Image: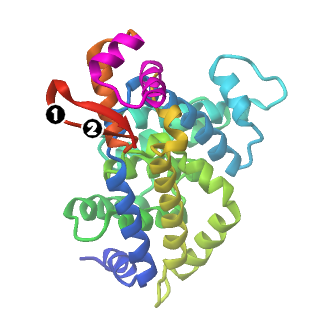
Amino acid sequence: MNKESQKRTERIESIPPIIVSKIAKIDELKGQWITGARLSPQVLGRLKRSVLITSTGASTRIEGSRLSDEDIEKLMRGINIQKFTNRDKQEAQGYYELLENVFNSWKSLKFNDSLIKHFHQELLKYVEKDENHRGEDPSQMHNMVEWTQKTLKEDKYHKLLVIGNFLVEFLKIHPFTDGNGRLSRVLTNLLLLQSGYLYIPYISHEKLVEDNKPDYYITLRRSQKTMGTKKEDITDWLNFFLEIVLKQSQMAVELLSKENIEKILSEKQLVVWQYVQKVKETSTGDVAKKTKIARPTVKQTLEVLLKLKRIERIGLGRSARYRML
């Protein structure tokens, strides 16, 4: 193991109990995201589109853009916004399209140097000023990316620690002339998705960072200041990063809560849910008949409501009945 790799390993081995505790909470919530795959594609699509707009707005504003989420939405619908510079609009469009690609294709993307360089080109592809800065060859980055890739694969250390270390080091190396902060946030989304945090496209990571922007910069600087010294310590940064992921996890699980249930159901699922709330007890056949919704859709919706612990089933098979909990 070379000196740099040894230092990385030491950084994530010397973590205090509070970090371990946060990771345990995050993984407990990760386990509660049980119905994501069972939600209707239309609902997941709607949530994803909303997050793309929120994340694009937040990530570009962290770097000084003045575009609101409403401006981003107009921009993506092809409406020209005269009051903003071309630069702001070009950066927003590059970010939106790159993040959308990550959300849609994360399973097939291979995390390596080439991908990072390609992402940087995509991020700045609309920005005229940075024509000369795209596709650089930041040599300092190679060893760090290789170690991150290898360590994630080995699974000896918790993936969140490895991702946290990658981010603090990537932002210290600052491999590109421009776009490092935005690129780091796109890579955060990718690495979290590839590590099994599948609710990432439905709650904006970038918005939570924007809401805590002073702490973001303070903890980064504090931790980066120790790097290269005899006593490296990235606890401050890991604490911040994990706090954001924990909040994201809590918000994802809250999406499945009683208060938010109407946001995650499709139109037909919503009709079934509203009918079930009105009656004392019902069956799949009754719901299908009264709501005029196809029996398979009713059955699938009742399963979702069972998983969400909104209803209970009495009996089995065709004679099974359902009622509110």
Q: Which residues are magenta?
A: 267-291
The image shows residue 61, relative to residue 272, as above or below, that is below
- Quadrant of residue 322 in the image? top left
Judged left or right of residue 83, residue 11 is: left
Image coloring type = rainbow
Where does label 2 land, which residue?
Answer: 313
At 36% across and 75% down in the image, what residue appears?
A: 8
Where in the figure is residue 196, as x and y percent of width and height? 31, 51
At 43% across and 32% down in the image, what residue appears?
A: 101
User: Closest to the observer: 172 or 24?
Assistant: 24
Where in the figure is residue 314, as x and y percent of width and height? 24, 37
Q: Quadrant of the C terminus?
A: top left
Q: Element at badge 1?
A: loop
- Residue 284 counted in the magenta span: yes
Q: Disc 2 vs disc 1: Cβ atoms closer than 8 Å? A: yes
Q: Amino acid at mark 2?
A: Arg
At 50% across and 49% down in the image, what residue appears?
A: 254
Main SS of residues in magenta: helix
Where does label 1 land, which residue?
Answer: 316
Where in the figure is residue 33, as x and y percent of width and height? 36, 48
